[in-house]
Image (cartoon, helix red, strand yellow):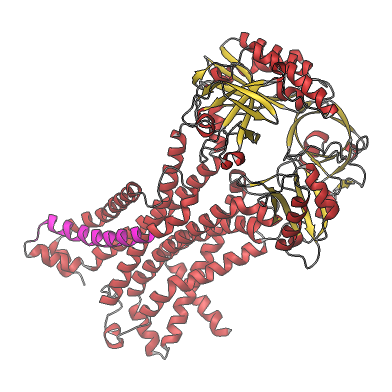
Amino acid sequence: MGTILQDMRYALRMLVKSPGFTVIAVLTLALGIGANTAIFSIVDAVLLRPLPYKDPGSLVQLWQIEAAPGAYPLTGPDYLAWQEQSKTLAGTSLYSWAFSFNASGWGGSEAALVTQAQANLFSLLGAQPLLGRGFEKGEDQPGKNHIAVLSYGFWAQHFGASSDALGRPIELNDESYTVIGVMPRSFWFRAATDVWTPMDMSRKNLAAEGSHQYLAIARLKPGVTVRQAQAELTTIVRRRDTDPNDKVGAVVTTLKEQITKGASGYLYMLLGAVALVLLIACANVANLLLARSSGRQREMAVRVAMGASRVRLVRQLLTESLLLALGGAAVGLIGAWWCVQLLPAVLPIPRANPVELNYAVLLFAIGVSVIVGILFGLAPALRGSRLNLAEDLKSGGKAVLGLGRGDRLLRDGLIIVEVAISLALLAGAGLLLRTFAEMRRADIGVETRNILTLALQLPAAKYPAAEPRRAFYDQLLERARRAPGVQFAALSTKLPLEGGNNGYVKVPGEKDSSLANQLVEWNYITPDYFRVYGIPLLQGRDFNAGDMNHAAAAAVKFLEMNKTGKMPNPFPADLTLTSVINRTMARTFWRGQEAVGKVFFYSGVPVTVIGITGDVNESSVRNEVRPEAYFPVGLELAFAPTMVGHISLKTSVAPGSVLGAIRGDVAALDSGLAVLRPRTMKEIIADSMQSTSVQAMLLGAFAGLGLLLAIVGIYGVMAYFVSERTHEIGIRMALGAQRGDVLRMILGHGLRLGAIGVVIGVGGGLELTQVMKDFLYGVSPTDPMTFAGVAAILIAVVLAACYVPARRAMRVDPMVALRDE
């Protein structure tokens, strides 16, 4: 220990005596270690730490599968069958997505995100409220479920974090709920939620067959595997299937996998990117140490003459590099702390565990710094301890500037590595930027300029029937159309790129069995919807007032028939429906035929096609367009009392300028309604591409950081190259060499290194970018344009970094250079 402390004291003195070198080395390492620590802290919170629930390894997510590809939410009857018959599950709990409700009761009103859940959700998770209590058995039955548990943020914002909130009433969609508990600040489950209320778990409420609208989690019994539970649940759901189908079944995944699967890919990609940045930083510092060691040859020779072994010298030099690495870690942690405050807010990641610089992250930073210290310090240490004792002692105390052939190869090799890694990083960033640009240019089938959207949810307690709901929206649309700057106004149940409902249709006489499993998107609209979004009508006609009235009247009769359970056969004309379909649906179900006038069955009801429109991408820019059918909105107003209505406005002025008038119209009709998520169509598109834009931004930032470090490294090496060859340059110029010859010599050396690095980087980059193919859109992971552009940028950067040292070499005075030692 005494020897180690002696080495550390000496190393500190040597680093303090060279403040410029020390500061540059520490800052270079701080950039690399800080970036790695920040990204690792996110990876640790999201992917490595267990979920903050009781026995998280036994928690699973439940899904259903059908003949159509994909996993789907559950139907109520299937969930009840699993809950009652399963022998592999210790417990199950049903819950909904988080929906926006009109909320009030604290002296104001606004939209609140509400999740409805079975009463045992919190107990199944092992989550305890901070204040009050959670739901108890039986409180998810009608008449007992008007209670609420608040999130910590909602409680602090609207009730001042006061315990007096317990027992207070709040209004959710015009229904009164009593606050019984507040969850801790750290509690998060699946999605942001302001208020939890018990779901109506009565069999009557969950009775709808074929309606996949519920989410569920479960806890496995001890010793039961995911595969065993999935096999059992599949058997149960097939046993109750009235139309036996071996493609119907269950999907069981661990809750951890379900929560993190959307984030794991790009988090590991970012972690790989910052690891490459750290390698560039290591190469830079290794070159600095290599250059510094050539000036310490006499010092090392004296130490050997006094009895120091080569191992002793290597240990001393490694101690210096480790101190540099630990200094870089200390400074890097400051930057990492700042990034940890910023990145979680912009990254679309699960929030189950908080992102923080905990002990695991600190140990990671220390471990990385030790590994890095050895990595960049070992080669210079071995070089510095390899001495020619007689020659080095005769150096008269002056630095021996010359490097051996092996040392030059090592120095040049490090530059090649920096260029190659920089190219791989820049290629990845370039591909993501190209992806972002391609997504921005993608045709989603609608106009994007001057369109404003907002959402409303009419409380079922206040609007119990379809007619008052329809009357409200008719009045609102009429007022909106009269607002200055509004050209068209429409109501719909979903927006482009936002997703929605889908289902199956049956075409009479169709013999292609694959079409029976073809999902069709549903959207319920008013006539001006296509005009608002500029969706072209290709054939037939749009909906008119007669279609709207007919559908509303038919919906009332359908509701009456549902109560009796009897459906007419054949259907009378007053119960048939009309629909406008998109071009993809026409081509899918009526290939080579005239689709207008054709009939398909929707939930057993005959529907006549009256028009065909252009395709609209309803789910994501990355996804293919699906068949879609549009129906009069009166159908959904009748069958879905809690329908979220999306108001879309086409304006002749800036969309935001009409929002105030629309808010006033809503308040004039019902002052208790909150306007939900007002956004322009361009904002909706930006939201849909948020993940890609953040990935491109971060990878671009890391690539830029790597490029900056590479520039600094190349400049430093070339400056040293010039100083090392000052005597040679003087001789060349004394013998008649021109300044242009010197310039070509220096630039040529740098260009050779850069070209080799580019060739290696392209080869490695083509392999590395293959792992990014799932993140790309409209561009290949081997896109030649991207690689060629990045290669050209790097060659230009190498030449620019070499130019300043080359200019200095051109101005060398031959007489001064000839006297240089």
Find residue 745 and report its horizontal and vertical position in percent: 17, 61
**Residue drawn at 76 percent across, 61 percent down:** 58
Find residue 10 and report its horizontal and vertical position in percent: 49, 77
Q: Which residues are magenta?
A: 737-765
Residue 291's place in the image compared with 623, above or below, is below
Depth order, front residue of 494/74: 74
Depth order, front residue of 101/156: 101
Q: Residue extending furthest left? A: 736
Locate residue 96 relative to residue 284 in the image: left or right: right
**Residue drawn at 40 percent across, 90 percent down:** 306
Instruction: Report how many numbered discs are placed on residues in the image.
Output: 0
Find residue 467 and report its horizontal and vertical position in percent: 78, 16
Split into 4 quadrants, where in the image is the C terminus?
Answer: bottom left
- Residue 355 can be seen, yes or no: no
- Residue 370 in magenta stretch: no
Depth order, front residue of 127/285: 127
- Residue 359 can be seen, yes or no: yes
Residue 447's place in the image compared with 724, above or below, is above
Q: Of helix, strand and loop, which mostly describes the magenta segment?
A: helix
**Residue drawn at 42 percent across, 91 percent down:** 307
Locate residue 565 relative to residue 30 in the image: left or right: right
